[in-house]
């Protein structure tokens, strides 16, 4: 049963490699960017380290004076290449619905460019009450705190930092670049193999509060 609370339950989720497997579309976009600019980009490597802001990754391949321009072009190319091959990760839809079943709000707090985050969710048929993009680590925490999120679910160590910054329960999912042990060592309160275990965990968590 939902727990009565003075504020509505709000659960935050990361996007890339937490709710959605965006690797194929990101890979295709970097390949297109490389072909267009004539600059070598190891797209296979890029998709193993998703999470930090786009500009951080672009800086690995382009000089600083070109970073903003190239990032803008990447975001344009992304719209034609990234949505169709993206799929929801196991349990993602059920995790979102579990929050709603408890009368809660779903907040997607992501490092992804916000307009593209909205389009990803729309393409995946996944509705969120709050979507905020272009955030990372502690800045995610600021958004979580602003919207009263008591739980944040993510696959990256930066997501754990964001949850801790917001005094939210940090739920790590080992579907991204870090395994369960690394997520625990980073301070995750709970670690799940993937989101298929989230509804049961949420039921237990709310029942204990």
Image (cartoon, rainbow, N blue to C red):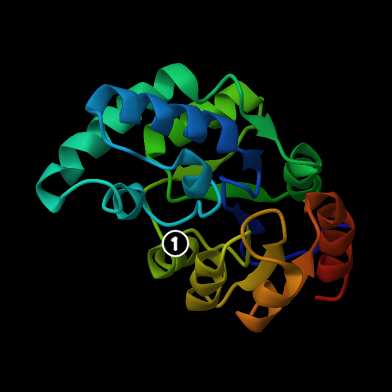
State the quadrant of the N terminus: bottom right
Question: Looking at the picture, how far across and down is residue 145, in whole percent?
Answer: 47, 67
Left or right of 93, for residue 145: left
Q: For residue 8, say whether it is visible.
A: no
Along the line of sight, which residue is nearer the eye, 170 or 73? Answer: 73
Question: Looking at the picture, how far across and down is residue 159, in whole percent?
Answer: 54, 64
Along the line of sight, which residue is nearer the eye, 117 or 35? Answer: 35
**Residue drawn at (42%, 57%) of the image:** 52
Q: For residue 155, say whether it is visible.
A: yes
Label count reads 1
**Residue drawn at (66%, 44%) of the image:** 19
Left or right of 147, for residue 32: left
Q: Residues within 10 Å of mark 1 (few under 14, many from 20)?
A: many
**Residue drawn at (38%, 64%) of the image:** 139
Instruction: Work out whether 18 lies above or below 185.
Output: above
**Residue drawn at (64%, 55%) of the image:** 176
- Helix, strand or loop at disc 1? helix
Residue 78: image quadrant is top left
Instruction: Work out whether 102 lies above or below 158.
Output: above
């Amino acid at each position: 049963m939902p727990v009565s609370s003075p504020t509505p339950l709000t659960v935050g989720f990361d996007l890339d490699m937490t709710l959605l497997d965006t690797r194929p579309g990101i890979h295709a976009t970097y390949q297109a960017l490389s072909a267009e600019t004539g600059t070598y980009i190891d797209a296979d490597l890029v998709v193993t380290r998703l999470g930090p802001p786009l500009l951080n990754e672009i800086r690995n391949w382009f000089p600083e004076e070109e970073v903003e321009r190239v990032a803008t072009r990447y975001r344009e190319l992304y719209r034609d290449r990234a949505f169709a091959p993206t799929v929801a990760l196991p349990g993602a839809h059920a995790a979102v619905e579990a929050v709603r079943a408890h009368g809660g709000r779903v907040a997607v707090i992501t490092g992804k460019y916000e307009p593209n985050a909205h389009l990803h969710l729309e393409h995946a048929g996944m509705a969120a009450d709050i979507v905020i993009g272009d955030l990372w680590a502690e800045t995610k925490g600021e958004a979580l705190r602003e919207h009263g999120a008591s739980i944040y679910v993510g696959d990256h160590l930066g997501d754990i930092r964001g949850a801790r910054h917001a005094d939210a329960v940090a739920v790590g999912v080992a579907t991204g670049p870090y395994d369960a042990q690394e997520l625990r060592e980073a301070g995750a309160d709970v670690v799940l193999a993937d989101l298929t275990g989230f509804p049961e965990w949420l039921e237990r968590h709310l029942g204990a509060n």
